[in-house]
Image (cartoon, rainbow, N blue to C red):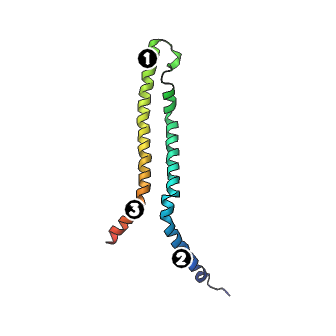
Amino acid sequence: MNSSHFLIYLPKIILQIIRDFLYFPLWWYSVGLWRTLIHVVNFWSERQINLGLAVWAKNLFTPMYGQQDFMGKFISFFIRLIQIIVRSIFMLFWLIVGLVWLVFWIALPPLTIGGIIYQLL
């Protein structure tokens, strides 16, 4: 009564595994790369918002604490300029991290295949 479902479904399972194995590189460099790119761009956007770089740049010439005298404007300008420079350095760091992640994503399959071939030879 209990027929072997294993023998019935084995060809379907094997074909599905072969199809997934052959589809993987296409997915990795199309859909997977696109999703990774979207995540990296969102990551950069969040870092820019967290650093507030646009706000600091927008208010570069606005005096702090409402001081309208020359020294108040002078000090405010240079303090904000230093803040913009330091925050730009942090943003550059996050840009490099995102680019390294994209390069890693693109290079991982060839490096993996090369490592496997190297171990087999």
Quadrant of the snapshot with the N terminus: bottom right
> Which label sits on residue 47?
none
Task: Between residue 69 and residue 58, name the one nearer to us.
Answer: 58
**Rendered view: 92 above or below 109:** above
Give the residue drawn at x 56%, y 75%: 13
User: Disc 3 residue type?
Assistant: Pro
Give the residue drawn at x 53%, y 45%: 42
Q: Earlier in the sequence, mark 1 or mark 2?
A: 2
Secondary-structure class at tag 3: helix
Please indicate whether residue 21 sits to the left or right of residue 89 in the image. right
Identify the residue position indicated by label 1 in the image. 74
Task: Between residue 80 and residue 106, name the one nearer to us.
Answer: 106
Q: Position of residue 95 (x, y in %)?
A: 43, 42
Q: Position of residue 104 (x, y in %)?
A: 41, 54
Identify the residue position indicated by label 3 in the image. 110
Secondary-structure class at tag 2: helix
Q: CA distance from mark 1 to mark 2?
A: 73 Å
Q: Give the farthest residue toward the left.
A: 121
**Closer to viewer: mark 2 or mark 3:** 3
